Amino acid sequence: MSLSRRSLLTGAAGAAAVVSAGQHSAAAAPSAAPTASGPVRTGFARLAAEGYARLGGMKVGVVTNPTGITQDVSHIVDVMHADERVRLTAVFGPEHGFRGTAQAGGSEGFYEDPATGLPVYDTYQASGQKLADIFTRSGVDVVVFDIQDAGARFYTYIWTLYDCMVAAALAGRPFLVLDRPNPVSGRDAYGPVMHPQFATFVGRKAISQQHGMTVAELARLYNGEFVPADAGRPVELDVVTMEGWGRERFFDSTGLPWVLPSPNMPTPDTALAYPGTCLFEGTNLSEGRGTTRPFELLGAEGVGRQWAAAVNELALPGVRFREAYFAPTFSKFQGRTCGGVQVHVANARVYDPVRTGVALLVTAKRSWSGFAWRPDNWIDKLTGSTLVRTMIDAGASADEVVAGWQEELAAFRAVRGQYLLY
């Protein structure tokens, strides 16, 4: 980026470019969100209650997936398609697809939706001018985004959001974000900040591993800090805030139905563990894919009870670990019995999933001689730098690793604070 607000952070692992405070006028805050109490009303619920007035008769394209639902679990595409007040003309599907038929790393391709007859365009792994051309070819006047996030930098839907914002700016289309809760709350940001040289689809830009923001807040941050560098200008952005959500609220307190946002995110409990335990994707241990408790069950063939004992000795706040055995039905160790741990979150309000994930890596490496990083150093893509891997290899404790990213995290928190809505 070339924005004047940029500051350069230096940490134990090297430099991470993060821009400092200040909002672009295109990301100006809407009227304040209502008080956080009682059941939560999503951005879509408020848009519908307003009679879709913000869409103003425009031809509408929606970026969504199975999580784009109403309180009665009807899909918003089906609802809008049946409503004469909306000119819904296209749907754009992310990873896993619009109706959710694809596994991790897959999508549905272009097709005509059998339920509505609408064309469904595949946006997965499309970005920049290629994605802008898809928006232009679809003929839509406005792009609407409504997808449930999981709260971690490497959950790809927030980068679908970013790519679609850049593409909408390039195509000259306004962009409307319908907000939904951050399921792991928005109390604060945690974890290392991504360094630009490690940018991938599991982390496009310099945000922290657990960002503590809603998708509408992220959209405002993107538009103020990153989109102009990639699109030449900010996108014309509008957001519809939720009613009743506050920063301390976890998903189980919202009164909203949970729809798994991807095949390996079955419950809100999964989302609680995911910002830390997804790091095991970067190792030769199973992260629990192929079990009924992905990201809560971790292990490998040959791992014994020593691991659970070692991590429990750390007395990490809000969490305990059970010696566990499981046989994944797919992914790593398919059909083979693994030993390891199950993560049990006892108090989400004091639990730090990123610190916990690092502690699990440190103790796994110390208690099991077979521990290894994935050969492609995928762990560096997940954490956003070499810091975590190199410090653990050097024998650092979990607290020493966590201390290594505090300077860059503090700088990101200052930026983040400029874009919060609740």
Image (cartoon, grey):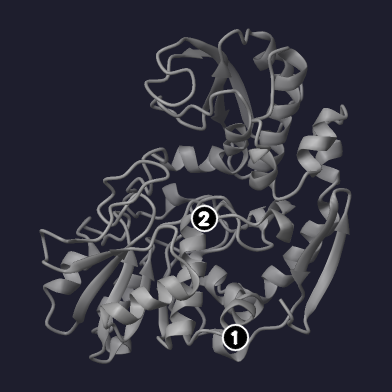
Q: Amino acid at mark 2?
A: Arg
Judged left or right of residue 313, residue 116 is left
Q: Name the residue rendered at 39%, 24% in the picture.
A: 330
In x, y percent, where is residue 64? 33, 63
For this view, does 254 lie left or right of residue 190?
Answer: left
The image position of residue 210, as x and y in percent, is 63, 52
Frontmost residue, 403 versus 375: 375
> Dot 1: few (<14), some (14–19), or many (≥20) neighbours within 10 Å?
few
Where disc 2 sits, the SS reads loop
Tell which tag, 2 or 1, sits nearer the viewer: 1
Q: How many marks?
A: 2
Secondary-structure class at tag 1 = loop
Q: Quadrant of residue 419?
A: bottom right
- Is 246 in front, or is 196? 196
Task: Identify the residue position indicated by label 1 in the image.
Answer: 232
Q: Residue at x 29, y 79 (%)?
A: 137
* Quadrant location of the C terminus in the rendered image: bottom right
Residue occupying image coordinates x 53% and y 29%: 287
The residue identified by callout 2 is 249
Please tell me how crowded label 2 is: few (under 14), some (14-19), or many (20+) other residues with Cα within 10 Å: many
Tell me the quadrant of the picture where the N terminus can be found. Answer: bottom right
Examine the rendered structure and indicate whether residue 371 appears above or below residue 231: above
**Residue 317, percent from left and from top:** 70, 34
In the rendered image, is residue 194 in sight? no
User: Is 95 left or right of 220, judged from the image as shown?
Assistant: left
Q: Position of residue 360 (x, y in %)?
A: 68, 27
Q: Quadrant of residue 226?
A: bottom right
Mark-to-mark CA distance, 2 and 1: 37 Å
